Amino acid sequence: DFDAAHKAFVESVNRAIDAGQKHLLDTQGPDGDWDARKAGAAIPPDAYGELALVLTALAKTGVKPTHPKMQLGLKLLGQLIVERRGFQRFQGTLPGHRTYAAACVAMLYDALYVEHPHRGPDGRMSSAKVKDALPKGERDGLKDIVTFFTGTQRKSLWRYPGPPNDDEDLSATQYALLGLITAGRVGVHAPPTVYRKALERILAWQERKPEGGADELFPIYLENPAWDPSDRYPRYTPGPKFPARGWSYQGKGKVTGSMTCAGIACLAIIKDRLKQPGLKPPQGLSKEEEKAIDRAINCGIAWLSKRFAVTENPEDGASWHYYYLYGMERAASLIGLQNIGPHDWYREAARLIG
């Protein structure tokens, strides 16, 4: 019985979430952290990002900003950020953030203070809106983060803090854009030029047809309108075909599942920002650019569909496996993708993790 099986699956997911929340609340230290360091030990540069990631997990499970344990964690987070800023200032001029850690802080504030889009009873998607007033300290912190990301963008993309001529990469870029788009949800925006600079290179870094070779076409799977819970007909059936083209870490070398998810997520974020009301070309997207983004995303979905897996990172095995699962969730959520190929990606990944 489909309804019974679906209900059992939802209940098992909710039990796992509740158990995870309880574990985190039970294991938080008296200082608000989850990392028991020895007295006097140096605090790693990314420690505040790790703390923000745990607090984000709690926020996603429904823990409110006013919860005593969230308050304890937020107080420590503020202290760590202040300490980090005093310890290092990027190239002497910008707040001393770290690429991944800064994005995690922005995503935490988004999880705490923004009501995300959801499908209503009429089937329509709502718009994101601020559900609670963002405290001044958090707003000022987001302004610092946006300043950091706009100031550390290289020629087009991002990298870890380092020499100005250091290479760009798609992983750091994904996190920079996640940080910027979540800050934007509470009204702290980076200028459209930041997104436009990234767009051209991300499109250029997508895998191309080998010289003299043929396109590797693969279908995008669509939900079958004839499907019913009895499974008399397949739920997802092949639709339009696209060249199966993914992304690599730095636009060259091995194409992998984790980086293909990153490429899709980056394009989805750029499209979302540059299609905001009031933005017209050359700041906003032209119709041709929007088509190019949609095609690139569909080519990425085709690549993931052909090589779909949850037990490993496609084309990279055990390397960065959970990073890939996280990236798949981010990419699919950003574009509203319920299936990859004929697979219910969420259900299969949830069963693996659970």
Image (cartoon, rainbow, N blue to C red):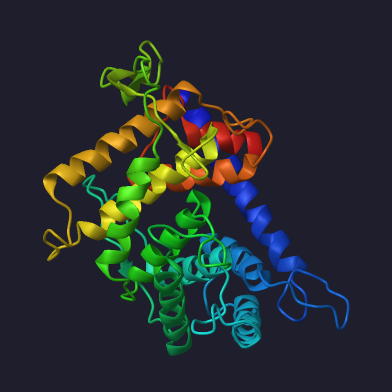
Q: Could you say which quadrant of the image residue 28 lies in?
A: bottom right
Query: Considering the image in quadrants, where does the C terminus appear?
Result: top right
Q: Could you say which quadrant of the image residue 99 lies in?
A: bottom right
Is residue 10 or residue 310 the one in the foreground? Answer: 310
Indicate the position of residue 64 as horizontal and vertical percent values.
Answer: 52, 73
Q: Residue furthest top?
A: 232
Is residue 260 or residue 166 the one in the foreground? Answer: 166
Indicate the position of residue 203 as horizontal and vertical percent values.
Answer: 33, 43
Vertical side of 266 occupied by 41: above or below: below
Q: Is residue 326 left or right of residue 124?
A: right
Q: Residue furthest front?
A: 165
Q: Is residue 238 left or right of residue 20?
A: left
Residue 27 in view here: yes
Residue drawn at 49 percent across, 58 percent down: 175
Residue drawn at 64 percent across, 42 percent down: 320
Vertical side of 14 occupied by 75: above or below: below
Q: Could you say which quadrant of the image residue 217 lies in?
A: top left
Q: Is residue 246 left or right of residue 172?
A: left
Residue drawn at 17 percent across, 53 percent down: 285
Indicate the position of residue 250 as horizontal and vertical percent values.
Answer: 50, 45
Vertical side of 137 occupied by 28: above or below: above
